[in-house]
Image (cartoon, rainbow, N blue to C red):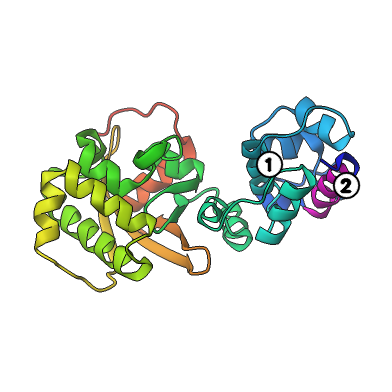
Amino acid sequence: MDRDQLADFLRTRREALQPEDVGLPRGRRRRTGGLRREEVAALCGMSTDYYSRIEQHRGARPSEPMLAALARGLHLSLDERDHLFRLAGHPTPTRELRLEHVDTGLMHVLDRLQDTPAQVVTSLGETLLQTPPAVALLGDETVWTGQDRSMFHRWFTRPESRHAYPPEDHDGLSRNFTADLRALAARHGPRSRAATLVRHLRADSPEFARLWTQHEVTGHRGHHKRITTPHLGVIAVHCQMLYDLDQDQALLVFTATPGTEDHEKLQLLTVVGTQSLPASP
């Protein structure tokens, strides 16, 4: 671990970021050119004292999960992320694990969508980041671990995951998800994570196994979904995707047609977030 270089690298990256780069208000009394230490700590999900100790050449060596959180909070590029790991005395993550790292460009866009339901997802349906309105719409999808991190896996193995969608839409979604997984497995090959997920689902889900044998292939679809919320009922949304093909990730944004009841419901979610909502009439 190169403690001095690690501290200097974090400090320069912190000072290079502006509040608006990470979705924070600048405020009239701000004198600091970049971000404050407490702001970086909050973005990384750690205490200010813990982060400050690293910048002050003190404290224990950060673990790999902590380094990943620092890379995400500081909006580091992949090369910068790898450099951070080397300075801390850890091997750089393998290419397979790079899926955990959110592209800097996608993060910048997401930071400017804090009043809109939006999230960064991998091709396997693993949610990496969400805006507060997205959490209000779908729940916190970043808490899952293991195979359940994939929305595809949860859909076919956890019946409660389907509560977010009207029952009459379930069959069509199951067919679409199976076709999506087939395309992923074909594109990435038999040793890919997608192929591994397919093998697990064929063994664990009779429904998926049945649909898989039908060999249904669909092209890219314009996504329109109906999402059931606990307090506002069903909301019809447009699912717009901004892809980063190098990272195999996408920014998913949920919108609704202005002037409709669905648009009003999304606006209400934006205002109140995850707070308790009164039941809709």
Question: Does 196 sit left or right of 217 as displayed?
Answer: right
Residue 133: horizontal and vertical position, in percent? 46, 43
- Mark 1 sits on what residue? 67
Residue 92: horizontal and vertical position, in percent? 66, 51
Q: Secondary structure at mark 1?
A: helix
- Is the residue 219 above or below the residue 113 in the image? below
Classify the position of the C terminus by image quarter: top left
- Is the residue 58 above or below the residue 113 in the image? above
Q: Are marks 1 and 2 in contact (CB under 8 Å)?
A: no
Residue at screen point 69% across, 53% down = 81
User: Which of the two residues, 57 or 30, is positioned nearer the viewer here?
Assistant: 57
Residue at screen point 32% across, 52% down = 196
Labelled disc at residue 5: 2
Amino acid type indicated by mark 1: Leu
Which residues lie in the magenta part?
Answer: 6-17
Question: Does 249 sit left or right of 53 as displayed?
Answer: left
Residue 10: horizontal and vertical position, in percent? 81, 46
User: Which of the two residues, 177 or 107, is positioned nearer the viewer here?
Assistant: 177
Q: Secondary structure at mark 2?
A: helix
Work out whether residue 274 can be spotted.
yes
The overriding secondary structure of the stretch rendered in magenta is helix
Q: Earlier in the sequence, mark 1 or mark 2?
A: 2
